[in-house]
Amino acid sequence: MSVMINELMLQTEARRVAEDLYGKRNGTSAHFTERLIGMVEEAGNKDFLVIHNPGGWGCSPLEQCLDWERSIVEGVTNTVQQLGYSATVMQHLRSGNSWWSHLRDLREQARFLTRGRSTRAKVLATEVNFVTRCTDKLQVIMVGVSQGAAFSNAVMRQLGEAKRVYSIELGIVFAHVPRRVVTDHICAIDSNGICPDPMVRRDLLAGIRSYGAAPIIWLKCQLQRRPQRFTRCIHMPGHEYNWKYPAVRQRIEDFLSTAFGGGGLEDGSHEARAIH
């Protein structure tokens, strides 16, 4: 695995891509240029780049994600390495981790939930396109759960027929199911094999119960002086996709093994199926 262009060409191309997306003389454009270069420098000598798209608002660093979500990212990375490849993990955070950031991004989040439109999906698609064009054989695997799964699918729709990009999507929220695309590069899992997922099956009553109880659980933890993040107080049976669940682990391992286990990194011979 190696970077295909020299450092000067890399900087020039990254700047051009950033300016096409954000315009010239823009601080955001300069920051994006640095991110593009950093992605190539980190992933350029690896076989795989695993990109984690967090669930919810997409703002949680990996170490702050729920244990089961983190287990999926670790499981995918370990499986790739067990198949004999090198890998590095990055995150794509769609929002800041504060109430102000959530308020600022409310319109974007609502538009994505109701219409499937996301400016952030275009950003990540641009990043993935850039890093694969600047490296000779790098494979990209996106991993997303819940809203992160829907976001990954939106990125795959932006990318079209990208040969070296794959997506593992677990527990996509029901509103996104009608627009979801499942191809031979997408592993879509809609059940953890333990019990039905209310977020996939549009079980609004179960969702209301879980989110309605969360503030009470959160307050109780505060009073007991064992504070928890609010997301850890949302308990929704069926909407957990822990790596230790056989139906989840086996499905992902089969997908990765079929795609990459024989060394045929670009044969595209595997088939994806949604588990219902």
Image (cartoon, grey):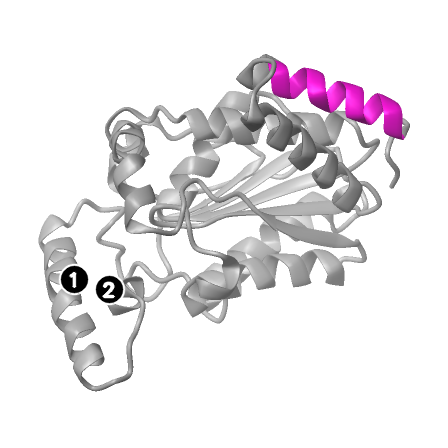
Marks 1 and 2: CB-CB under 8 Å?
A: yes
Residue 150 vertical position relative to residue 65 in the rendered view, above or below: above
Question: Residue 270's image quarter?
Answer: top right
- Packing grade of label 1 (10 A; few <14, some 14-19, many >=20) is some
Q: Which three-letter amino acid code belongs to the residue tagged 2?
A: Ile
Upstream in the sequence, badge 1 or badge 2? 1
* Quadrant in the rendering for residue 76: bottom right
Label 1 to label 2, Cα distance in Å? 6 Å
Residue at (24%, 49%) from the top-left corner?
A: 199
Query: Depth check: 29 or 122 in front?
Result: 29
Give the answer, above or below, for where 153 lies relative to 250. Answer: above
Q: Position of residue 138 (x, y in %)?
A: 77, 38
| Callout 1: SS | helix
Q: Residue furthest bottom?
A: 224
Residue type, label 1: Ser
Above or below: residue 207 compared with residue 162: below
Q: Where does label 2 land, which residue?
A: 234
Front-most of residues 14 and 125: 14
Question: Mark 1 = which residue?
Answer: 210
User: Residue 155: percent from the left, percent from the top?
Assistant: 50, 30
Q: Where is the N terminus found, in terms of image quarters?
A: top right
At x 81% / y 26%, what residue is drawn? Answer: 10
